[in-house]
Structure formats: structure tokens, C-alpha cells
Amino acid sequence: MHNKRKKILIGLVLLVEFIVFITSTLWIFRGSVLNDLKVKQTSTATIFIPGYGGNAVSTNDFIEQFNEHKVAKRTLRLHISSDGKVSTIKQYAKVGNNNPLVQLLFSDNTHPIKESYQMSNVMKYLYKNYHIKSVNLIGHSSGGQIAYEYMVNHPNEKNVPKVNKFVSIANDYPKKDPRVKNLPKNLEVLNIAGEIYNFGTDAEEAVDIVKPMGKLVAPHVKSYKFHLYKAGPLSAEHSMLHENPEIDKIIAEFLFK
């Protein structure tokens, strides 16, 4: 009896190790979807804005996948203090025709409206210190709100980069907003929602809440696209959307092709 239990225990341990091995292997090679992606290389910087309580982990995977597959270049990591002062934590590469990537880290990272006003300082900082004339904005969850609020509240700012494209991932917006007319007229927008299987949600944001962004912004911008990403929880759950190379590819094709 003792030997039988021991064999069962050994079998369970081996099964767990096998599952861990397979999962780890799949995780390592998950970025292969980006292997053959061909993109244009320009000086337009792409700014990554984390969501509520977000930190470097929130956008690291995006940046590492793009950098590793030579889609874009990890270039700057910026810190924004609670009073809005912007500083460079690290410069990884020169800003050039290499699709430079800029990662933002807010000290006060739980007040999206406040962060949206601090975005003005970020944009002026990039324009003055790195001569960046145009940008794309990527916001996950309330990071999308930060980007949107910045654009609608600062339509006529000078000495800041022009916003070319905006990617919003799993965020909701007001049904009506008179300020929406302040969005850049040549702005191109990609709105992404995640759905776990057929449950209608990514476990935090319902598809029916994310999708209506189109009715709000489409009449006021150059183009609008909605993409529904449907998969299991390891790929389509709210926080996993920024850890997913398939999403990275969708975004890269929108931003850089």
C-alpha cells in the first residue's frame, strides 16, 4: 500500500513537472509570431502608458518583444514625480529612425486625470530634450483614459509632439463628451477588447463597455478600428493582454506598417 501511494505521488510530481515544462516552453517561444514581421522604421516615438497602479511590469513585455524582434527600439524610460516633474531614468538608445519606444512610470499612478495633465509635461520634455516631433500613444486600461484626457484637454499646445496614432486596450469611455472634437483630426485609433472564450468580458472590462468607444471618437478622427481578441484566460484576461505577443503583432501592424 505504501509503495502504491509512493508511485502515485511520484506520478503526480512528474505530471506537474511535465505541465510546467510545456507551459514554460510555450511561454519562451510565444513571441515567434513577431519573427517575420516587416515594418517601417521612423523617428515617431511610441509612448507606453500603464493603467491604474501600473508600473514597469505593466509595459515591459510590450517593449521587450518589440525590441527583441527588431520591430522597434527600446529607447527611454521616464519617471514622472507626484508633482509632475519629468526625468529620464535611463536612455537605452539614441532617438532616431528606429521606432523609438518610451516607457512612462508615474509616482502617483492611481489618479488617471492627474496623470493626464502630467502628460503635458511629458510631451514638452520629449520635444525639448529629445527633439521628438511626433508620437503614438498606447494605453492599457486606464492608461487609455490618460491618453484620451490628455488629447481632449490640450488641443492647442505648442512645442509638443503631434499625436499620430492611439491604441486603447481594454478601457471604457464616456458615451458622450463635447471635448471629443478636440482630438487630433488626423488621429488614427485602434481599440482592443479582450474576451475570455464567449463570456463577453476579459474578467474586468466587458466587451459591451469597451466597444462603444467607436461611436464617441469615429466621427472626429481620421480612422477608427475595433479589434476583439478572443481566447482563454492566459491570453485574453485583462492583465494578460499586455503580456501577449499576438496582441503585440496586432498593435505593431497598426503602428508601424
Image (spheres, rainbow, N blue to C red):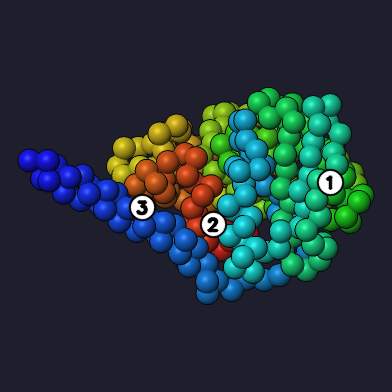
Q: Secondary structure at mark 3?
A: helix
Compare residues 30 and 40 and report the one nearer the observer. 30
**Residue at the image position 50 percent from the left and 58 percent from the top:** 245
- The quadrant of the image that shows the C terminus is bottom right
Frontmost of labels 1 and 3 is 3
**Residue at the image position 77 percent from the left and 53 percent from the top:** 76
Q: Which mark is residue 248?
A: 2
**Rendered location of residue 224, percent (x, y):** 56, 50
Compare residues 225 and 144 and report the one nearer the observer. 144
Residue 98 position (above or below residue 19): below
> Mark 2 belongs to which amino acid?
Asp
**Rendered location of residue 164, percent (x, y):** 71, 54
Label 1 or label 3, whichever comes before in sequence order: 3
For the question of whether residue 191 can be seen, the reply is: no
Q: Secondary structure at mark 1?
A: strand
**Rendered location of residue 61, percent (x, y):** 58, 52
Residue pointed to by mark 3? 20
For residue 253, which quarter of the picture? bottom right
In the rendered structure, the answer to whether residue 86 lies left or right of residue 222 reads right
Label 1 or label 2, whichever comes before in sequence order: 1
> Mark 3 belongs to which amino acid?
Val
**Rendered location of residue 219, percent (x, y):** 60, 44
Residue pointed to by mark 1? 88
Measured in 3D between alpha carbons, the distance from the residue under mark 3 to the one under mark 2, in whole angstroms, is 24 Å
**Residue at the image position 64 percent from the left and 69 percent from the top:** 70
